[in-house]
Image (spheres, rainbow, N blue to C red):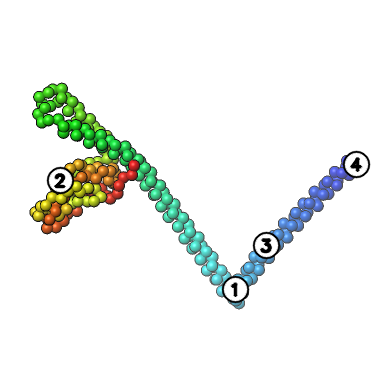
């Protein structure tokens, strides 16, 4: 009884395998027939086999060129993405401290105001006050030096052409002998971070001159640092 059941199972497995093999063969035959039909359709209108093969080669060449163009565009897109990513990383590193740097510049301004409030000659007459003044001056220099290490640089544009991207005009100074829009006075020095303006210099500009001052060289590019 057990042998008969085993034989039945073997027979069913063999039938199933034969059925699957027949289905695979039928699918392969259908695929080949479709390819042949497609080739036949393409051969319509070509009485000369050489002409047909030449047309097929031209088609394959066009497909190859299209694939090459797509590959080149993909390479260009990847290169642009790499450059944009590198630029974004550089900007993030350079300008991430912009807000902090502005706050430190306000501290520097307060230190300068404190120094300006000391009467002339008072520090020389009082050793304790002199030491305090020197300490404040040293603190301000150390602060600005630390900021400079992180890309924050001072701009003092006296004598240069007014640049609205880097300077803020506070007043005009009538002077017919100086080129128009020349920075004559710097009320407050400006600062840049990298190639962007961190704080514009507050200036007074000439008015009434015969011509504009020459464009300054080496100034930072336009742009306001974000922070």
Image depth: mark 2 or mark 4 in front: 2
Q: Relative to residue 198, is residue 141 depicted above or below? A: above
Asked if the residue under mark 4 is in contact with the one under mark 1, i.e. CB atoms within 8 Å, the reply is no
What secondary structure is marked by label 1? helix
Disc 2 from disc 4: Cα separation: 115 Å
Neighbourhood count class around disc 1 (C-alpha, 10 Å): few under 14, some 14–19, many 20 upward = few
Asked if the residue under mark 3 is in contact with the one under mark 4, i.e. CB atoms within 8 Å, the reply is no
Neighbourhood count class around disc 2 (C-alpha, 10 Å): few under 14, some 14–19, many 20 upward = many
Neighbourhood count class around disc 3 (C-alpha, 10 Å): few under 14, some 14–19, many 20 upward = few
Of residues 43 and 215, which is closer to you in this image? 215
Please indicate whether residue 49 sits to the left or right of residue 176 in the image: right
What secondary structure is marked by label 4? loop
Residue at mark 4:
1
Ranked by sequence position, the earlier of labels 1 and 3 is 3
Asked if the residue under mark 2 is in contact with the one under mark 3, i.e. CB atoms within 8 Å, the reply is no
Residue at mark 2:
185
The quadrant where residue 35 appears: bottom right
Of residues 210 and 143, which is closer to you in this image? 210
Please indicate whether residue 202 sits to the left or right of residue 73 in the image: left
Please indicate whether residue 86 sits to the left or right of residue 221 in the image: right
């Amino acid at each position: 009884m057990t042998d008969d059941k085993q034989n039945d199972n073997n027979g069913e497995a063999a039938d199933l395998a034969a059925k699957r093999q027949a289905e695979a063969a039928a699918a392969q035959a259908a695929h080949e027939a479709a390819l042949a039909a497609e080739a036949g359709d393409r051969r319509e209108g070509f009485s000369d086999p050489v002409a047909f093969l030449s047309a097929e080669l031209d088609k394959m060449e066009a497909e190859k060129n299209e694939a090459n163009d797509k590959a080149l565009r993909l390479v260009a897109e990847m290169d642009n993405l790499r450059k944009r990513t590198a630029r974004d990383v550089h900007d993030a590193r350079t300008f991430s401290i912009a807000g902090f740097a502005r706050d430190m510049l306000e501290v520097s301004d307060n230190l300068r105001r404190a120094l300006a409030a000391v009467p002339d000659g008072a520090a020389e007459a009082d050793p304790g006050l002199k030491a305090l003044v020197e300490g404040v001056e040293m603190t301000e220099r150390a602060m600005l030096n630390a900021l400079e290490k992180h890309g924050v640089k001072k701009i003092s544009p006296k004598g240069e052409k007014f640049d609205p991207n880097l300077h803020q005009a506070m007043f005009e100074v009538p002077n017919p002998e100086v080129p128009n829009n020349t920075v004559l006075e710097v009320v407050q020095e400006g600062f840049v971070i990298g190639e962007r303006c961190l704080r514009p210099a507050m200036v007074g500009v000439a008015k009434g001159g015969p011509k504009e001052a020459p464009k300054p060289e080496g100034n930072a590019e336009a742009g306001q640092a974000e922070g």
